[in-house]
Amino acid sequence: MNILVCISSVPDTTSKINLINDNKEFDRNGITFIINPYDEFCLTKAIFIKESTNAKVTVVNVGGSNNDAILRKALAIGADNAVRINKEALNGNLVASCIANYCQEENFDLIFCGRESIDFNGGKVPGFLAQKLNIPFVNSCVGMDIHDNTIEVKEEVDNGQIISKVKYPAVIAGQKGLVEEKDLKIPSMRGIMTARTKPLEVIESSVECNNNIKVINYEKPSERTECKIVDSEKVNDLVELLSTEAKVI
Amino acid sequence: MSIITITENWEGKFKKTSFESLSYGRHIANQMNSKLIAITIGGNNLESLIQYGADKIINITNFNFENNNNTDIAKVFSKIIEEENGSTIIISNTNIGKKISPLIAQNINAGLITNAVAYPEKNNLLKVKCKAFSSKSFVVYESDYNKNIISIIPNSIGEINQITGKGEILNQESEIKSNQDYQILKRSKQNDKISLSDANIVVSAGRGLKGPENWPMIEELAELLGAATACSKPVSDMGWRPHSEHVGQTGIAVNPDLYIAIGISGAIQHLAGVNASKNIVVINTDAEAPFFKAANYGIIGDAFTVIPKLIEAIKQHKN
């Protein structure tokens, strides 16, 4: 089985987002970039499949050479090879086009992506990619088993879960539940050593750089007013505040 | 050119988020002096959509949200949008919205603006403020596409009852053939409780509750308030509560009118999922818990004594 895991590079979850240049950019200085947490669930799932069958796991990223560090980390976690498509990830459509072009040259059975990235939270790439490749799209996937030529997947919907049988190749957008948080793979010393010798291929893409949805500027959310502390003996006061001041109950 | 809202229902019943996206569509239709068309599949009580501003309603009777896969649903909607010459399409960023909007955008070659939290700018209907960085910032996007899909975060503008006239209701069948590569086998309904994306109030609890056996009081409080229940990451990791209740960075992001956090310290990853809430109440024994800094109201105290009192106080208030 040939598996692709799409990986995006995002600011660490604990990063403070500071705005610069008239709020037109966010300050990348001092921010640590990590593998998007949703992608990590996918990567671990792919490695579980590799361990139990005989799969090959490739990781792909669209971006500049700054992202090589996270690709090396993915190799240390257990991916077999890494590919970086050397293009600035301006928007979801561009990223999906680059990956789709790459997929057409390879024969992937399963293409994993995180449900969304924790920077722009757009959740566009997995669906765009599936549609460009004209293959099924499983979103918010919280469980997956492989049968002969199909996969059985569990998807989260607002009112519960849906279990489906899907023919692969397919795009699977994963999240927590695909694997448990405690089972997430972290790089071992041996993994880190072998990652150095694993291939990290940089390819150029012929996809045109259209940026049809532009970031105009950023805005900071307004600060919350200072917290009003209510005496734990006077819970009625809280109810009163919620009713007359906040007007929410 | 027309404005189209995709309205979601479950077993025929329209969701609050659908009324909200209709209200959003109505706002744009008014500005453009255009008609608002509501499209849906397998809907009942279609008249309810008129109350939120739909001039025309197209209901596809041979498809529904429960039994059809997202590829098919996206194809059905794409076809109607093209037939009706839709230029701006509004959808709610629910789980189903997230599944079908990227597919529709590719089908009809439209721009997709996700996570909108406000109406577009007055003088530029393609300039929209959206959530980014898990609510640590907003981002304003501008689209150059001729056709656009705007996906709005539930409870961003609220639903607005606004009868504008009489709506025309059309029930049709779609000729789209179902894709056999993707078959739904089973759907499990969590329960009849309010879903997190539909809730105005969310009652959430964390490790401070000490064990899953102590959740009945959380559920009682939630029921009393007509709220959905949620939990912190450790609680879902330990299996005390289902994953679907985990609110935070890698779980669900919510933005209710009121978020009550009980026994949750407020790690930055949790705050990322709740920052957008309009009001936050924190109940925690630890006065130094970081959550108090992100809250509007707080009680420093033990959940086991405060919650029963709170339940009583709310009962009294309701009478």
Image (cartoon, coloured by chain):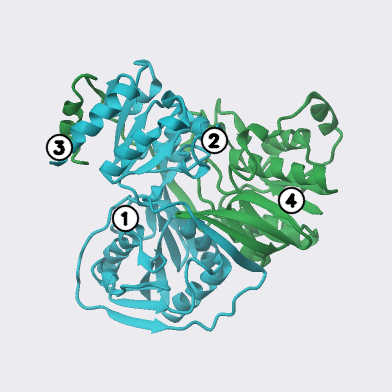
Q: Amino acid at mark 2?
A: Gly
Residue on which the image places disc 4: A4
Identity of the residue drawn at 85% across and 48% down? A54
Q: Amino acid at mark 3?
A: His
Q: Is residue A32 above or below residue A207?
A: above
Quarter of the figure that contains the N terminus of chain A? bottom right
Q: Is residue B298 left or right of residue B244?
A: left
| Chain letter belonging to callout 4 | A
Residue on which the image places disc 2: B239
Colour of chain B, in one word, is cyan
Residue nearest the viewer, comparing B301 with B211: B211
Which of discs 1 and 3 lies nearer the camera? The answer is 3
Same chain, marks 3 and 4?
A: no
**Residue A21 position by quadrant:** top left
Residue nearest the viewer, comparing B75 with B222: B222
Q: Is residue B102 left or right of residue A109?
A: left
Identity of the residue drawn at 70% across and 40% down? A44
Q: Is residue B312 above or below residue A175?
A: above
Look at the image and tell me whether residue B22 can be seen.
yes
Q: CA distance from mark 1 to mark 3?
A: 35 Å
Quarter of the figure that contains the C terminus of chain A? top left
Q: CA distance from mark 3 to mark 4?
A: 56 Å
Q: CA distance from mark 2 to mark 1?
A: 39 Å
Marks 2 and 4 close (CB-CB < 8 Å): no
Which of discs 4 and 1 lies nearer the camera? The answer is 4
Residue on which the image places disc 1: B119
Same chain, marks 1 and 3?
A: yes
Q: Which chain is green?
A: A
Which element is circle 4 on? strand
